Image (cartoon, grey):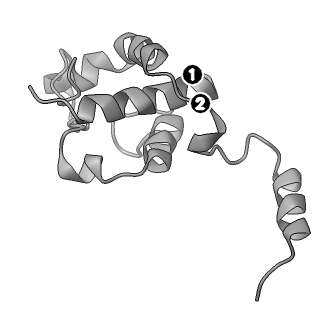
Amino acid sequence: MRLPKLFGLLLCVSLGPSSVLMAQDYPADVTRGKAVYERHCLTCHGTGGWGDGPTAASLKVAPADFHRFRSFLKSDEELLRTIEHGVVYSPMHSWRGRLTDGEMQDVVSYIRLLSQQGR
């Protein structure tokens, strides 16, 4: 059953703008993403995104290695959701309220760049 377009519009309005964050809502900026990554992500995920940051060895759950196939296959929306909400039972906490929506999107674009680079 197809729903009229108006229904979808009303649904989005009733949920409000902060209930669903879509990656395409913000033009990503790799330069800003690198600055946010270096400030907040590097200590666990490492300079190159290999999951080998200075604190990585002390964590009970290893940080994501963005070069691994399963990380590489994740959509931008999945990465964004992980940054926004964190991962249960891991040191990856929620960045909602600490980073703006734009900063989270910028970090995703920088992670994509890192994942394409070799050692």
Bin the neighbour count of mark 1 within 10 Å (Cα to Cα): few under 14, some 14-19, many 20 and up: some
Kindly indicate the quadrant of the structure image that contains residue 25. Answer: top right
Tell me which residue sits at (23%, 35%) in the image: 116
The residues bearing labels 2 and 1 have C-alpha atoms spaced at a distance of 16 Å
| 109 horizontally vs 6: left or right | left
Height in image: 3 above or below 98? below
Looking at the picture, tell me which residue is in the foreground, 59 or 82.
Answer: 82
Count of residue discs: 2
Circle nearer the N terminus (2, 1): 2
- The answer to whether residue 98 shows anywhere in this view is yes
| 117 horizontally vs 21: left or right | left
SS of the residue at dot 2? loop
Pointer 1 residue: 99
Pointer 2 residue: 27
Looking at the picture, tell me which residue is in the foreground, 94 or 40.
Answer: 40
- The answer to whether residue 63 shows anywhere in this view is no
Tell me which residue sits at (35%, 12%) in the image: 38
